[in-house]
Amino acid sequence: MTLRRVLLLLASVALGIVLVALLIRVGKIDLRLTLQQLESVSPIAFLKLVLLNSLLVYLSTAKWRSIDAVLRRSSDSVPSRITSFAVTSAGMALGLVLPVQVGMTAARTLGTYFYGRPLKRGTVGTLFEQSFDLLIVVFLAVASGATWFYRGGALMWMASAAVMTALALLTAGPAIALIRWLAASYNSRIAAPRNRILRTLWELQHSSLLNAALARRLVVLSVVRFGVVVLMAGQTAEAIHAHIPLWHIAAAVPFVVIANAIAVTPGGLGLNELTYATALKLFGTPLAVAAQWGLANRVLITASCFTVAACATIMRAVEKMANSGTGETNSKTEAEAG
């Protein structure tokens, strides 16, 4: 690692700490009370959060595997569902200590290293998969913005969110067709793509990745994933007995996800909590309550992510041992038969 990268990393961490300190000051957070709230979280409440987190990882894994199915060649190896789940859970955990957009990509690229073409299947596949999550929150941010502008409530947000979700589904097919047409139009001017970017554009035009049915499936999974994120945030609020309406959280989440997508701090540290507190205040949650919950939410989500990642790693190790044992048994049987 170069000196420049080390300095950038230190600056990123320092900025995150400064933002958290700002949140504590502006939100007048009582750290002792926050610690007491975290200590009072029941095992059942934390187990619910872990299960929701597992569902979130499962949905992300399902999206990635759908994309990987069209990216890989027939000669490429296919990671098992447990391996894919373990890699995705590791990526989510890394996304809390690295810049959000780096953690998942790094984990999946390394995770597919022994399965063939890790850059395309791990990096491109992950970026394509996560682009649908970002697409959905952009649509839902419009619903949240309209609800805030017209001073609406839960009913208005849900109705607006339903309309924007339907619009996202309806535009998925035409958007894919437009991208394919633009790629074809650009590539028609080039006889033989030589550099990597142009080759990628040419491959994109002829790839099964630009498929309307696949795009609609990814949109649906991203919508469900958004719902799970909201339920997880609601669960952390319930766990520490913070009185925050669930629709306030749902309306705030799009702005938080967008902020995290451009965050330069590790795991969006500081920016995530400030965005949550600000957005929740706009929808009627007191700033002190929102800020205190935001800090506790960070701790609980981090703990649940690493718990899921640890369990998935154990499951992967057990699967590997089982496969190894099966291979040895088969080899012994073949030897005896010979």
Image: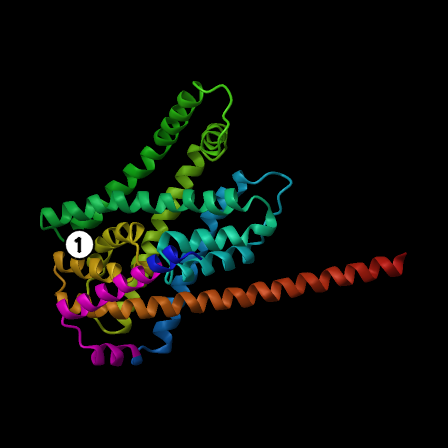
**Magenta stretch holds residue 118:** no
Q: Give the camera-side residue of 235 and 11.
A: 11
The reply to whether residue 129 is in sight is yes
Q: Check the image and report above or below for 119 versus 206.
A: below
Residue 22 rendering spot, x and y as whole percentages: 18, 66
Q: Residue at x 54, y 46 (%)?
A: 118
Looking at the rendered structure, the kind of residue marked 1 is Ala
Residue 34 rendering spot, x and y as whole percentages: 23, 76
What is the quadrant of residue 287 in the picture?
A: bottom left
What is the quadrant of residue 248 in the picture?
A: bottom left
Q: Residue at x 14, y 63 (%)?
A: 285
Q: Is residue 227 left or right of residue 103?
A: left
Q: Which residue is denoted by mark 1 in the rendering?
A: 154
Q: Check the image and report above or below for 172 versus 147.
A: above
- Read off the magenta span: 9-38
Q: Residue at x 46, y 42 (%)?
A: 124
The reply to whether residue 243 is in sight is no
Magenta segment main secondary structure:
helix
Residue 312 rendering spot, x and y as whole percentages: 51, 64
